[in-house]
Amino acid sequence: MTDSAVDASNGLHRSLWLDQALTKPGSPCPPLVGDRLADIAIVGGGYVGLWTALELKQRDRAIDVVILEQDICGAGASGRNGGYALSWWTKAPSLRAKWGDETARDLILKSEAAIAGLAAFCDEEGIDAEYTKSGWVWGAFSKAHTGAWEQAVQACRELDVGDLHELNREAAVHLSGTETLASAVLDRTAAMLHPGKLVRGLREAALRQGVIIYEHTRVRHFSRDRPARLVTDKGIVKADKVILATNAWSAALPELSRSIVVVSSDIIASSPMPDRLRNMQWLNRAGVNDSSQMVNYVRTTAEGRLLAGKGGLASAYGGRVNKTMFHSPERAHVVKRQLDKLYPEFSDVPVECAWSGPVDRSSDGLPLLGSLPGCKHIIYGIGWSGNGVGPSRIGGRALASLATGYRDEWSSLPVVVDCPRRDLPAEPFRYFGGRLVRAAVARKDRVEMQGRHPDWITKSLAALAPRGVEDR
Ligand SMILES: Cc1cc2nc3c(=O)[nH]c(=O)nc-3n(C[C@H](O)[C@H](O)[C@H](O)COP(=O)(O)OP(=O)(O)OC[C@H]3O[C@@H](n4cnc5c(N)ncnc54)[C@H](O)[C@@H]3O)c2cc1C
């Protein structure tokens, strides 16, 4: 959209997930050449763009929907993530505080239904996304983190949502595969899946419904008038409505630059070792997160790999998604060191591949949907904050309602706002302040992992960090 956006077709490091999904060639989606009209143009072919397109077609097959994707569908976060499909239960305390019990309950139930809906959708469409309703373990690997989930669990009990089970050490060790886990809570509504197969399956499903997808078609800029003109390298789309499903790249737009910060999430994967995982009964089972603020996550895959990730190690100046957001050997080393601490059982296991991706964090960890100021026809859905696998389905419904002018339960979700929030500092304060805050978060995590309490300056600075999946 501005020239600062990275040209992802220019040789970006891909994820293992996407490489695996691409071994099954999909239908061709050549770039846009020439000019055309569309009822609705969606920028971005990740989960949000694809779900929105599918939802629009389900409501009215006659709507002419085109997706413009600068790389291939799934090249962004949707083909790179950890594959945890989680609900919003971890947000229960802040959802209640913001919008009251009834709305909090409704949002959490909708996010649970989105996970179940993923399984049904994959069944109907014949997508083998390796969906396993294995649950998710949020654990304490140090005394300082004991009960990090308590407030959220209590709020869910009071709201009568969730399927949460607090685990003693024995159960936690059994479910997580590591002796270092002291206690945990198991969320049975969560599922694990193969993100690459899901996003490429969504792409095929959208094509079947008549969505036109142009890959390798970067939108260089678009006009704010109506119809909007979306200018790409070899053609122009004139569209009555535009949907920006551009995740972290949205931070390059002046209207959205203060709504999100762009941070990295970094993943490493071992070579397959199904026998070893099977012996310890941890093959294709629950995904595990620790309670660090810069979260560490560990899971196994259907083919028997160990996969570990960490969120928030780097941020992007001015929200510019540059190449280091997609791969960083230095950050991969940090992830491996963390894995060795949490899972000493696997310290002998070599890393076979590593990749990263950009995450669009909002200040409260919840998505932001709405339209650009003064442009009701240019709609955006961003700020998934590292929890987009399940909630992007909700996003697709809400964005489709906003684009078609339906006033329904989706367009009236409280995450739909009239005007983009500008609650994050401007540059250069954001970047340099962010570095200070990130250093404090890292210090706090380190001290807490040693079972000690951080000093108040560290705690106060760390509290300024935008929220992730959990409320802390
Ligand atoms: C490493 C990593 C791990 C994660 N783990 C999890 C997890 O386990 N569970 C979870 O729920 N969430 C996770 N997330 C977050 C989740 O992946 C995202 O919230 C979700 O994929 C967002 O979908 P999206 O469609 O908004 O974004 P994306 O998939 O990033 O799609 C945006 C698309 O827009 C395209 N685009 C951008 N600018 C332009 C332009 N100018 N013209 C044309 N196209 C453009 C990009 O190429 C990209 O394909 C993780 C993210 C990362 C990076």
Image (cartoon, rainbow, N blue to C red):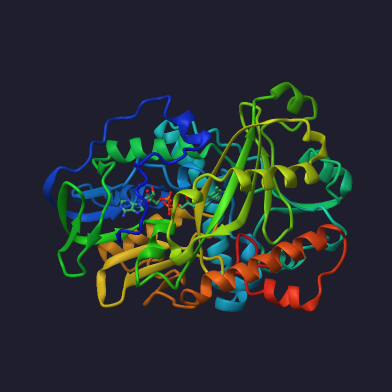
- Work out whether 418 lies above or below 345: below
- Work out whether 430 lies above or below 212: below
Q: Is residue 135 visible?
A: no
Residue 146: image quadrant is bottom right
Rendered residue at 52%/73% (across/down): 430
- Work out whether 3 lies above or below 269: below
Rendered residue at 64%/70% (across/down): 437
Residue 302, image x, y percentages: 61, 29
Rendered residue at 42%/60% (across/down): 320
Q: Quadrant of the C terminus?
A: bottom right
Residue 443, image x, y percentages: 75, 64
- Classify residue 210 as left or right of residue 418: left
Q: Is residue 315 visible?
A: yes
Residue 254, image x, y percentages: 35, 71
- Classify residue 416 as left or right of residue 105: left
Residue 377: image quadrant is bottom left
- Work out whether 408 lies above or below 198: below
Q: Nearer the viewer, residue 228 or 258?
A: 258
Residue 112, image x, y percentages: 56, 54
